[in-house]
Image (tube, rainbow, N blue to C red):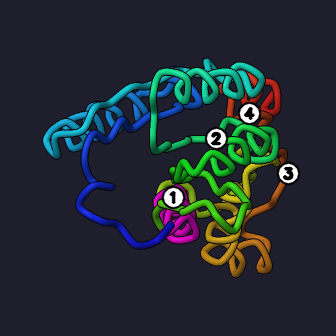
Amino acid sequence: KFGATPDDLKDKVIGVSWSNFQEERWKTDEAAMKAAIEAAGDKYISADAQSNPGKQLTDVESLISQGANSLIILAQDASAIGPAVQKALDEGIPVVGYDRLIENKDVFYLTFDNKEVGRMQAREVFKAKPEGNYVFIKGSGSDPNADFLFSGSMEVLKEAIDSGKIKNVGEAYTDGWLPANAQKNME
């Protein structure tokens, strides 16, 4: 529901399902999110899916059974999380997709400008290496953000690629955004 009454704002238990804590970014984000939720007088509960889409499904169900009456989900796999999201929505629990798009019209989406991040990354790499062979290790193919990032990078690098200053010698998606998969792609 989109209108909130004062009673709706009491006793919030916000369940956060994290894709993993292997990346320092998510640990930093968690600390800030937890502090903001608790500063508002709400209760924070969370689960770490450890980069496992199946575990994340059960994590979301567990957060609901622990009393979460709103959810924030950093999806490990935006498609695989669908059944858990739908269950929450069916129970009247609002869901926010954090950073990774969950394609469901009833899920709010909170992110940054992924295309601009791709542009920023490409500008810095291009400054350091304006000519030569480039390999593009993209994010997870199941996450639309990977394509936004790549698109932004290509906007910056297109002219250098077209002129032959940069040669694209390979590109691959990285399943699950896992560093080990990125390493395999590079090898």
The quarter of the displayed image where residue 68 is located: top left
As measured in the structure, the alpha-carbon distance from the residue carrying label 2 to the one carrying label 4 is 10 Å
- Reading the image, the residue beneath label 3 is 169
**Local SS, label 4:** helix
List x then y, in percent, for residue 187. 82, 26
Q: Which mark is residue 176?
A: 4
The quarter of the displayed image where residue 91 is located: top right
Q: Amino acid at mark 1?
A: Gln
Residue 135 seen in this snapshot: no
Q: Are marks 1 and 3 in contact (CB under 8 Å)?
A: no
Mark 2, residues whose alpha carbon is within 10 Å: few (<14), some, or many (≥20)?
A: many
Q: Are marks 2 and 4 in contact (CB under 8 Å)?
A: no
Looking at marks 2 and 4 on the same chain, the residue that comes earlier in the sequence is marked by 2
Q: Kindly report the secondary structure that dominates the magenta region of the rendered protein.
A: helix
Q: Amino acid at mark 2?
A: Ala
At x 67% / y 26%, what residue is drawn? 56
Task: In this rendered view, identify the residue nearer to me: 54 or 95.
Answer: 95
As measured in the structure, the alpha-carbon distance from the residue carrying label 3 to the one carrying label 2 is 30 Å
Based on the picture, tell me whether residue 122 belongs to the magenta stretch.
yes
- Reading the image, the residue beneath label 1 is 121
Mark 1, residues whose alpha carbon is within 10 Å: few (<14), some, or many (≥20)?
A: some
Residue 146 seen in this snapshot: yes
Looking at marks 1 and 3 on the same chain, the residue that comes earlier in the sequence is marked by 1
Based on the picture, tell me whether residue 59 belongs to the magenta stretch.
no
Q: Mark 4 or 1, which is nearer the eye?
A: 4
- Reading the image, the residue beneath label 2 is 75
Per the rendered image, the range of residues in magenta is: 113-126
| 41 sits left or right of 157 in the view | left
| 180 sits left or right of 107 in the view | right
Q: Mark 1 or 2, which is nearer the eye?
A: 2
Looking at marks 4 and 3 on the same chain, the residue that comes earlier in the sequence is marked by 3
